Image (spheres, grey):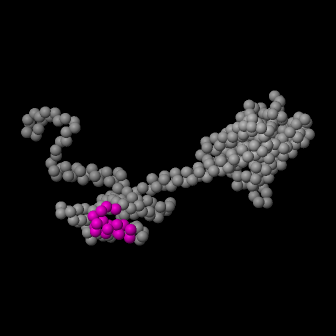
Amino acid sequence: MRSRTGDRKEDVPSDEVIALHPAESGMQLGRALLHALHNAGISVLYQDRELKTVWARNMRAPWVSDTADGNGILPAAQVDRIGAAKRDVIASGNPQRLEISVPAEDGFRWFQVWVDADHGDGGTVQGVVTTMVETTDQKRREQTLTTLLREVSHRSKNLLAIIQSIATQTGRYSDGIADFLTRFRGRLQSLASSQDLVTSSNWRGAALRELVSGQVGRNGVDPSHGLRFRGANPYLNPNAALHIGLAMHELAVNSVSYGALSRADGFVEVTTDLDTAADGLALSLTWAEAIPASDIEHSQKRFGSVALERVVPASLNGTATLEIMPGRLEYRLVVPHGNFETE
């Protein structure tokens, strides 16, 4: 590298800073800082001890103003807060930090505001520097996360309540610890299967046909042969998905053990209808299958019938009937519109 005089100089190491003319250095630094402020969305305001604006950079709404006080179009309450902070910084020399919100069309805009003292050579405060950074996106993410955590907590409590109910009812109608563990484990796995559908939909719920098919398939049955599903396919909300999934589990287990699905050529029919009732739209679900005459009374005093006729409908504000007739089992569940969506 050659100097301006033409004398050859040694190569400058890459980590060595090349000194520039002070004026040139100051202009470059100023331009660089202006670009940085603009790109980062940072507004800076300098005021003297009387809070008169000396200079301002990258000022934008809600800080933009034609007035000399530099308070822009902020609400009066926020103007007072920032003004009080500036006066305190001038009096004490200690910095302050505030979080403020400004009404907007889609809610609120949020800002972090730093107020720092500008100390002169003698240490006296000769002005204040106010730095404003918008944090609306970050604030909204935090609010969304808080809402989601509350929702997860609420749903976890509901899920634990369901598990507690399952444990209580299973224990009441089990013949011993081995029978309890077998039945309870199956019901928990059924609940987990329905919960997987709910979670995969970002907690929206589950499509009814997918839910029924999954519960039948869990018991070693090929739904394409063992299940005939006809009718509407509404989207169940999370609570309905868990409870209707439990009902389908009970019916499928009973069918595989004693009913139509215990035969290689057997099948069950699930028919759904959307009916207009006096109090609004309702979902009617019917499970029907042929059963051997010898098993007519098998399920009537077990937990399965308690869940089907009492637990599930009560949890969904609906009604249910379980009829076991010679050669046929039919379960009908009717739930109001609050448990599902049709689109």
Q: Return the residue nearer the eye: 220 or 67.
A: 220
Give the magenta range.
80-96
Any part of residue 198 in sight: yes
Left or right of 36 on screen, residue 234? right
Q: Return the residue nearer the eye: 84 or 107.
A: 84
Residue at 45% x, 60% y is 109
Q: Quadrant of the N terminus?
A: top left
Q: How many marks?
A: 0
Q: Is residue 132 above or below residue 78?
A: above
Q: Is residue 28 above or below residue 127?
A: above
Residue at 27% x, 62% y is 117
Residue at 75% x, 58% y is 280
Residue 52, given in percent of the width and then of the height, sits at 27, 69
Residue at 70% x, 52% y is 339
Residue 123, given in percent of the width and then of the height, sits at 20, 63
Residue 115, given in percent of the width and then of the height, sits at 32, 62
Residue 239, given in percent of the width and then of the height, sits at 68, 49
Q: Is residue 56 above or below residue 263?
A: below
Left or right of 161 on screen, residue 176? right
Q: Quadrant of residue 60?
A: bottom left
Q: Return the residue nearer the eye: 49 or 121.
A: 121
Main SS of residues in magenta: helix
Q: Return the residue nearer the eye: 115 or 158.
A: 158
Any part of residue 65 in sight: no
